[in-house]
Image: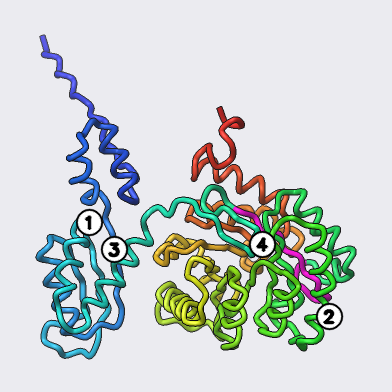
């Protein structure tokens, strides 16, 4: 009689998602670790891969030796060991615990490595859960981080790519803005210049003629913050004198040096959008982050606090279709800066080219980008179709941020 084979015990082995020490502490607590064990092991459970650009061979060799000594990994360009290259990028790979130990050592080294240690620390801190905070928009408050905020687009231009001419008259623009707020818009973004490909530049006087009458009506009749979409200091100054609450600069304070001074004088939040002439990049995300760091430095040096800044990856600006799609896949890398992220993809050509659809049939494509953006940590979405995107945002928030983001009473 044949012996029956003893059943093999099945163990429930799985991967879990641990992106930061808060999540690591929660998982350790769930299996019953004591407080000391949680404190000790949580930094070991979070793995980071950081890229550092533009180091000399001397800096790179020290950095690599110190990281290896902590038990981590460091990859450098071939030729660094014998100094046969002038510079190198470095990939640092290790746990948060290993990075913390590395920083202690780097602070004691020469060759500007203490400065590098401070910048690595800033990046690691930016990757921690940010929590919620109130953004002061000249007396009107926006809570950042609890749920995704929706910015409604109001174009008062005759040639906007999506709704050119529809809201050119002030009364019609006000009606549209009121409708967007009723549908759930947290912010209204008012623009008087088209930025579509091939647009005709508009004189300052014409831009002012378009937006100021509308802005006055919005400020009289709406309770939500009003953002003005402009890169011109004269227009920004006039709008802020009228009482606008936010500046949305598609050149991130880098087109005109006076723009930062205007923002600083009125102490308003500023959206810094990535933009450039052409589509050539050495390293797409690395170049974008370097661009944002320049803008942040410009703002801070002008007297505008870092906590008043919002970054926008600039989908559709200075990027090919493939580059736009890559940025969408890698949005979470913007967390490196530790600032709120605004995403503006509504009805854009990235969607039209991907789905082969005209502007008025891109709502589903926009919805996909909004949902993905929120999953990657976006805080604000800038959209035309407010009612639909509010629903997308609330559903995505419930999954990504948890039931509290949309009101527990609607979930339980």
Look at the numbered disc 2 and give the secondary structure of its residue. Answer: helix
Q: Which span is picked out in magenta?
A: 149-162
Give the CA distance from mark 1 to mark 4.
38 Å
Image quarter of residue 36? top left
Q: Percent x, y for residue 43? A: 23, 51
**Label annotation for residue 346:** 4
Q: Between label 1 and label 4, give the one nearer the viewer.
A: 1
Residue 150: image x %, image y %? 65, 55
Residue 230, numbered label: none
Mark 3 or 1, nearer chain start: 3
Quadrant location of the N terminus in the rendered image:
top left
For this rendering, which residue is in front, 394 or 107? Answer: 107
Mark 3 — residue? 49
The CA span between labels 4 and 2 is 26 Å
Query: Does residue 156 belong to the magenta stretch?
Result: yes
Comes first in the chain, label 1 or label 4: 1
Badge 4 element = loop
Q: Name the residue under label 1.
A: 95
Residue mark closest to the camera, 3 vs 1: 1
Disc nearest the viewer among 2 and 3: 2
Query: Disc 4 vs disc 3: Cβ atoms closer than 8 Å?
Result: no
Q: Identify the secondary structure beneath mark 3.
A: strand
């Amino acid at each position: 009689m044949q012996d029956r084979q003893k059943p093999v015990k099945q163990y429930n082995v799985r991967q879990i998602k641990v992106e930061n020490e808060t999540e690591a502490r929660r998982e350790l607590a769930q299996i019953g670790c004591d407080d000391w064990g949680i404190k000790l092991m949580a930094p070991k459970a979070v793995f980071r891969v950081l890229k550092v650009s533009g180091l000399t061979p001397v800096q790179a060799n020290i950095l690599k030796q110190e990281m290896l000594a902590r038990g981590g990994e460091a990859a450098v360009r071939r030729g660094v060991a014998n100094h046969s290259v002038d510079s190198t990028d470095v990939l640092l790979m290790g746990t948060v615990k290993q990075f913390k130990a590395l920083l202690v050592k780097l602070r004691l080294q020469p060759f500007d490595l203490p400065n590098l240690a401070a910048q690595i620390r800033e990046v690691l801190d930016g990757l921690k859960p940010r929590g919620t905070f109130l953004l002061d928009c000249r007396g009107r408050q926006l809570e950042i981080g609890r749920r995704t905020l929706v910015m409604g687009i109001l174009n008062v231009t005759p040639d906007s790519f999506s709704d050119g001419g529809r809201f050119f008259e002030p009364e019609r623009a006000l009606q549209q803005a009121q409708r967007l707020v009723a549908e759930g818009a947290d912010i209204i973004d008012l623009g008087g210049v088209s930025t579509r490909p091939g647009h005709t530049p508009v004189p300052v006087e014409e831009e002012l003629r378009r937006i100021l009458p509308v802005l006055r009506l919005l400020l009289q009749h709406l309770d939500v913050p009003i953002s003005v979409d402009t890169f011109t200091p004269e227009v920004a100054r006039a709008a802020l004198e009228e009482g606008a609450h936010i500046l949305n600069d598609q050149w991130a304070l880098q087109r005109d040096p006076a723009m930062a001074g205007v923002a600083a004088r009125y102490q308003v939040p500023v959206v810094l959008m990535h933009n450039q002439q052409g589509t050539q990049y050495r390293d797409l995300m690395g170049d974008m982050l370097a661009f944002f760091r320049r803008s942040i430095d410009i703002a801070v040096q002008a007297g505008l606090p870092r906590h008043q800044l919002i970054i926008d990856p600039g989908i559709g600006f200075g990027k090919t279709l493939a580059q736009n799609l890559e940025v969408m896949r890698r949005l979470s890398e913007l967390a490196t800066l530790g600032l709120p992220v605004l995403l503006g993809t509504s009805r854009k050509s990235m969607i039209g080219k991907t789905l082969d659809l005209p502007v008025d049939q891109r709502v589903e494509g926009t919805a996909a980008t909004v949902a993905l953006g929120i999953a990657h940590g976006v805080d604000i979405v800038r959209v035309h179709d407010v009612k639909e995107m509010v629903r997308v945002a609330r559903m995505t928030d419930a999954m990504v941020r948890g039931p509290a983001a949309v009101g527990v009473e609607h979930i339980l």
